[in-house]
Amino acid sequence: MVATYEESRRKRLEENRKRMEALNLPHLSQALHNSLSPKSSPSKHPKSRTLHREVVVVRRSSRVANMPIPVYKEVVIDRVTIPRRSYNRHRDFSNRVYASEEAREEALEKADELLSELQSEYPTFIKSMLQSHVSGGFWLGLPVQFCKANLPKGDEVFTLIDEDGNEYPTIYLARKTGLSGGWKGFAVAHNLADGDALIFQLIKRTTFKVYIVRVNSPPEGEQLK
């Protein structure tokens, strides 16, 4: 009975094998298996890597390598300031009058004559006024060589003293060699105009005595009439 079953089973297997061969199934199965199997490639094998963590010193110049690391702090700079004044005088800059070159030169000549009469031993210079000095910007640049030779190396509060003894504080900016804040007050108070010639005498370290020669001013003899 067992032999008959085994014989019958063997025959069925043989018949199935022949059918599969007839349909070319064994070759298709092998091709499918080969396509799904991963191909090993020597160049794609993952390489083992060993990671090391080290604490290193950032490279610095040999000149400063042994020096302490600088610490930067925000500091408040003490700037030179003066109290602000309010000026009620209205000035109409739309009607500016520009001095002619002849009038400007004449005022400078008169300033030279006055300077010779003063016979001062103080450092002195003469400045001819421009519109930027007496209106709008109100900035007065001083002679660079005079500043380097006679004035402080840092910003200071300077005092301008007019011929009547009135004092006007101004800010001197050393880097720009000029008068900034406060100069407007002096210019407005004395109604300075384009072409006026001013004599500056450095009577103290931070004090100027200022003499004003007006442009187009009449000769001294006519002033007395």
Image: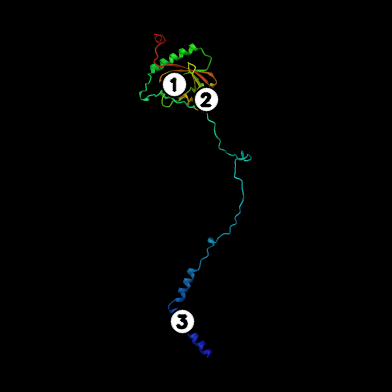
Check disc 1 and give the amino acid type.
Ala
Depicted 216 relative to depicted 64: above or below = above
Q: Give percent across and percent down for residue 14.
A: 48, 83
Q: Residue sitting at 44 percent across and 21 percent down?
A: 189
| Label 2 secondary element | strand
| Label 3 secondary element | helix
| Label 1 secondary element | helix
Front tag of 2 and 3: 2
Q: Report which quarter residue 18 is drawn in.
A: bottom left
Q: Give percent across and percent down for residue 128.
A: 44, 19
Q: Give the distance between the C-alpha atoms of the residues marked 3 and 1, in whole angstroms.
A: 124 Å
Left or right for 56, reference 119: right
User: Which residue lies under the disc numbered 2?
Assistant: 157
Q: Residue sitting at 47 percent across and 84 percent down?
A: 12
User: Which residue lies under the disc numbered 3?
Assistant: 16
Task: Give whichever of discs 2 and 3 has the lower sequence position.
Answer: 3
Left or right for 26, reference 54: left
User: Which residue lies under the disc numbered 1?
Assistant: 189
Depicted 52 relative to depicted 197: above or below = below
Q: Give percent across and percent down for residue 162.
A: 48, 18
Q: Nearer the viewer, residue 151 or 20?
A: 151
Q: Residue sitting at 47 percent across and 74 percent down?
A: 29
Check disc 2 and give the amino acid type.
Val
Q: Residues within 10 Å of mark 2 (few under 14, many from 20)?
A: some
